[in-house]
Image (cartoon, rainbow, N blue to C red):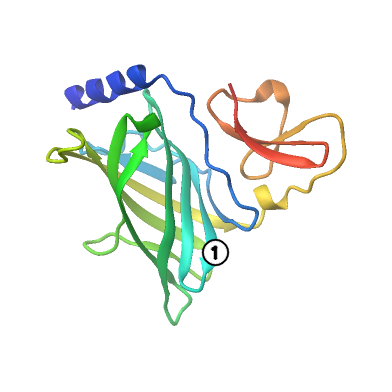
Amino acid sequence: MKKIYASILSLFIAASVQAIAADIPANAVCYDGSTPGSLVIDMGTGDITDGQGTGNVYITPVSDGLVDFLLPDLTLPGLGTLGDIELTNVTTTTEADGTVVYNATVEDMSLLGGAIHAKVVLANGDGKSCTTDAAGNAHFNIDVIWYMDYPANTQEMPIYVTFKGKQTSLGFSDIATDDTAAPEYFDLQGNTVNADALVPGQTYIKRQNGTAIKFVAL
C-alpha cells in the first residue's frame, strides 16, 4: 500500500495542476453528503477517509431515461484532488416503487490533469448498487479502476467509492442572482460563507452583479 501511495503522490507532484471543477447545470438535482462518513474511499485497506469523507452528487436530466452524473472534486486524503467523476448520458431504469437505477461505464476517464487514466463504473450487482429512491435517498457504488500502466492497461488499481446522500432542494440552482456590487459566497449546499473563511481547494459559488459562478478557492 505504501508503494501505491508513493506512486499516487509522485503523480500529484508531477502534475502540479489547479483543480477546476465542472460546471453544475441549473437544473441539477443535488444529493447532499455533507455528513462525515457519507463518502467512503477504499483502496483495498478500508476507508482511507477514516469515516470523515463528505461530498455531493449531482444528477442532471438529459432526456427520457438518460441523465448526467457528477461527483465533484474526488479527493484522496493527504494527497489531493483527483478531479470530477463525471459520466454523461447515464442510463436509468425506474422501478414500480419509484427507485431509479443508474448504469454507466466510462472506459477511459482522464483525472489529475491527464496524469491518471481510469475506467469508471456506476456499479450494480455483487452487493453494489447505484440508486435513488422516492424518499430522496441516494446510494452510489462508483468503481474507479486506475490504469497504472496506461495505455497498455494491464495493471489496475481499484479505488472503490461509496456515496450515500439525501436529496436537497437547496443548491446552485436555487441561489438567485441580483445586481449587487459586493460579491457574496456560498458553499455547494447554498450556505453563505464569508470571504475570509473560504478554504483553498474547496468549491464555492460567487454571486455578483446578477451572475452566479462556480469556482475553486485558491
Q: Where residue 183 sits in the image (x, y, percent)?
A: 79, 30
Residue 169 horizontal/vertical position (percent): 65, 57
Residue 154 in the image: above or below residue 99 = above
Which amino acid, mark 1? Answer: Pro
For numbered disc 1, what is the local secondary structure? Answer: strand
Percent of width and height locating residue 128: 28, 59
Q: Nearer the viewer, residue 18 or 37?
A: 18
**Left or right of residue 190, residue 157 in this image:** left
Front one among 88 and 30: 88
In which quadrant will I find the C terminus?
Answer: top right
Q: Is residue 101 above or below residue 120?
A: below
- Classify residue 4 as left or right of residue 20: left
> Percent position (x, y) of residue 126?
21, 62
Q: What residue is pinned by disc 1?
A: 61
Q: How many marks?
A: 1
**Residue 209 visible in the snapshot:** yes
> Which of the 4 image quarters holds residue 81?
top left
- Which quadrant would the N terminus be assigned to in this image? top left
Residue at image location 30% in from the left, 33% down from the top: 116
Horizontal side, residue 161 vs residue 215: left or right? left
